[in-house]
Image (cartoon, helix red, strand yellow):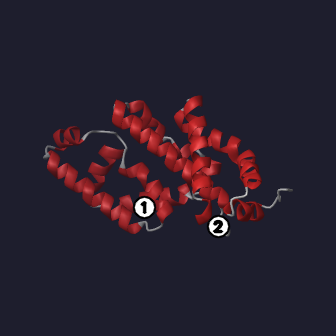
Amino acid sequence: MIVPKSNTELVKLLKKGDMASFDAVYNKYCHKLHGFVFRYLKQEEDAEEIVQEVFIKIWEARGKIDVYASFESFLFTIAYNSTISLLRKRVSETKSREYLKCLQQIDTADTIIDEIQYKELNQKVQSLVQQLTPRQKEIFQLSREEGLTHKEIAQKLNISENTVKNHLVTTLKYLKSHIDSSLAVNILFLYLFL
């Protein structure tokens, strides 16, 4: 079978379970995805594993693919989410500041991240942060930008850890409620779990 060149045709055939189209999609995007993931993980083996995971997910969810939406954006969103999940797991297991720095470098991926509208959403979040009360803004910035723990913030501001936690919960709820697309919620992960 001759595999069509158009993305829409490829995706339509992929959706029907056509293996040649799946191979064509894999060959077209595997190197781009690898480069994208490697920027954050900095480890060849992990990047390869994420790329394989992305294509397994694409194949398993092929029936749900929207052929009229941007397939590339869909693909990179899955890669982004898988990468973030792995980084989150590492943070949870090792409590390493090094992986937190990887998360904070998300804004360096300019061209591909544009596909998932990161810059626009980041501006929206920054704009929303400016609307917080002075105390909420201060606590949010100490936590998310300076990387202080709840305990460190509480000591620095001479307030209880519970107060710090309550301010952060309120702030994050506010941010989530003002960014409503599912993609925005995925990208907001940067602010929620640092």
Q: Nearer the viewer, residue 91 or 156?
A: 91
Can the viewer see residue 115? no
Image point 53% across, 35% down: which residue?
41
Left or right side of 107 for 22: right
Measuring from the top left, give residue 39's x and y in whole percent.
Answer: 58, 37
Residue beneath label 1, please?
A: 127
Q: Nearer the viewer, residue 62 or 134?
A: 62
Identified by mark 1, the residue type is: Ser
Nearest to N terminus: mark 2 or mark 1 = 2
Residue beneath label 2, please?
A: 69
Measuring from the top left, give residue 104's x and y in whole percent.
Answer: 46, 42
Q: Residues within 10 Å of mark 2 (few under 14, many from 20)?
A: few
Identified by mark 2, the residue type is: Ala
Q: Is residue 98 above or below residue 194?
A: above
SS class of the residue under badge 1?
helix
Left or right side of 130 for 10: right
Measuring from the top left, give residue 182's x and y in whole percent.
Answer: 47, 64
Q: Quadrant of the C terminus?
A: top left
Q: Image quarter for residue 119? A: bottom right
Q: Residues within 10 Å of mark 1 (few under 14, many from 20)?
A: few
The circle drawn on residue 74 is none
Q: Quadrant of the N terminus?
A: bottom right
2 and 1 marks in contact (CB < 8 Å): no
Mark 2 to mark 1: distance in Å? 28 Å
Q: Nearer the viewer, residue 73 or 176?
A: 73
Image point 36% across, 51% down: which residue?
192
Left or right side of 65 for 191: left
- Which of discs 2 and 1 lies nearer the camera? The answer is 2
Measuring from the top left, give residue 193's x and y in whole percent.
Answer: 36, 47
